[in-house]
Each structure stands twice: as C-alpha cells, then as structure tokens.
Amino acid sequence: MKNNSNLSVLLKGILKENPVFVLILGTCPTLAMTKNVGDAFGMGLAALAVLLCSNILVSLLRKVIPDTVRIPCYIVIIASFVTIVQMIVKAFLPELDENLGVFLPLITVNCIILGRAEMFAGKNSVGKSALDGIGMGLGFTLALVLMSTVREVLGNASFAGHAIAFLEPYKIKFMVEAPGGMLVYGCLIALVYVITKGKAPLKKSFSCAGCPNAANCHTACTELPAESGEKGDA
C-alpha cells in the first residue's frame, strides 16, 4: 500500500493533477516559452530542479519554520535554488540562458513551486515531497514540450530548431504568436479533460482563494491607510 501511495504521489502531477493543464498554474512561462521545443524543455528541467530541491528543503525544515513567516521563508529557499540553477545555466548553456531571459529568475515566484511548498512539502515527509517535486516537475516539462511541439511544428515548420521541409509551405505563423498559444493551450486543456474523463480535479475558481499567499494579501489590503480610499479584497 505504501508503494502504491508513493507511486500515486509521483504520477499525479503528470496527468491527473498536471500543474499546467489541470491546476492551471504557471500559465505565464507556459505561453511565453512554448514557441520552441528546446527552450520549453530547458525551462521545464530548470523548474523541475528547483521544485525537487525546494520541496526537499522545505520538508526538512517544516517543523522549524514558524508558521507566521513560512511564505517568506519558502520564497527565500526557492530563490536560492533558482539562483544556483541560473548560475549553472549561464555557465554551461549561455544560449539557453539568453533565450529564457527573465523567465528563468521568475521561477522564484512560479505558482507551481510556491504552491507545492505550501500545500505539500510543508506538510509531508522528505521522501514524499521529493516524489511530489519530481512528479509535478515532469508534468510541467511534458506540458511545455507538448504545447511547444504543436506550436513550433505548425507555426515554424520545424522541431527543436530543425526544419521540416515538407511543412514549410503550410506553416501557420499565427501558432507562434500569443493568440495561437492561447488556442493551443485551451485545446490541450480540453484534451486532458477528455482523456481523464472529467475525473481530474477541476479548478472551479480563478480568484485569489487558490493562492497560498491569499490570506497575507487580504490582511495587507484591509490594513491600507484610510486616506488611500482603498480597501482590497484578496
């Protein structure tokens, strides 16, 4: 039973709870970095490495970090691993670093990574947190590669930068533009829904309620000075 439980934790992020197509997280890098398969794969692996390392460290420190400052602590942990990954990419894959641009350091505030730290790693053992990080990272990577394959093949008549000659006359430039990305994203979400027969957990709300930092935002907004004339709602 334990092995089945561990396997479930590992596999759920790939399809049933895919962070991109089911939980609808990380949409910004998903849309921005899926014009090219190579860049999408690199982005996915970078996020996987940060997810795995941050989940492990958050789980190790879950009984030490005070509850009142857990979110800032999680962000510091994530930012530290993002910095390490960024330095490695800059040193060994400078072209990839240039292509990923600002989206590599922005992994620090990726909702997938902060969400897994808050919702899973902060409440579970190191082993399960590591499996969760690997599963969610693989799910994110597969989603990016799948989406970038569709967009690059149809939009640029190429795959990972290698031209597909017979598709050249039929390429649809629309696919590598923002509207094309949204179209492909929506179609793949629908496809995953069909494959899982609607058994995957649906995101019923796109409000701040799903964000691990919603409570802190609500507190900060309701404490705005009276003269500002604003009283926010999370």
Image (cartoon, rainbow, N blue to C red):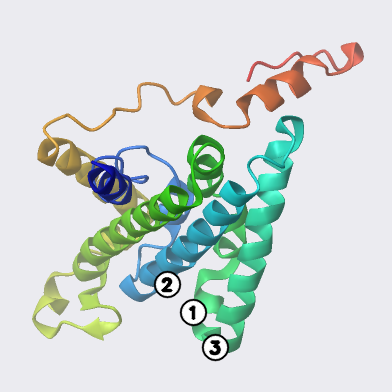
Spot occupied by residue 61 in the image (x, y as percentages of width and height): 65, 48
Instruction: Report if the CB atoms under discs 1 and 3 are less than 8 Å apart.
Output: no
Regarding mark 1 in the picture, which secondary structure is present there?
Answer: helix
Spot occupied by residue 84 in the image (x, y as percentages of width and height): 64, 72
Q: Which mark is residue 42?
A: 2
Q: Which mark is residue 92?
A: 3
Instruction: Report if the CB atoms under discs 1 and 2 are less than 8 Å apart.
Output: yes
Instruction: Report if the CB atoms under discs 3 and 2 are less than 8 Å apart.
Output: no
Indicate the amino acid at tag 3: Phe
Which image quadrant: the C terminus? top right
Q: Is residue 140 visible?
A: yes
Q: Looking at the rendering, which quadrant does residue 176 occupy?
A: bottom left
Along the viewing direction, whichever of 44 and 178 lies nearer the viewer:
44
User: At 60% from the left edge and 51% from the top edge, which residue is drawn?
Assistant: 60
Spot occupied by residue 166 in the image (x, y as percentages of width and height): 8, 81
Residue 234 against residue 112 in the figure, above or below: above
Q: Which mark is residue 109?
A: none
| Mark 3 or mark 2: whose residue is earlier in sequence | 2
Regarding mark 2 in the picture, which secondary structure is present there?
Answer: helix
Q: Residues within 10 Å of mark 2 (few under 14, many from 20)?
A: many
Which image quadrant: the N terminus? top left
Spot occupied by residue 197 in the image (x, y as percentages of width and height): 11, 32
- Residue marked by disc 1: 96
Q: Is residue 109 visible?
A: no
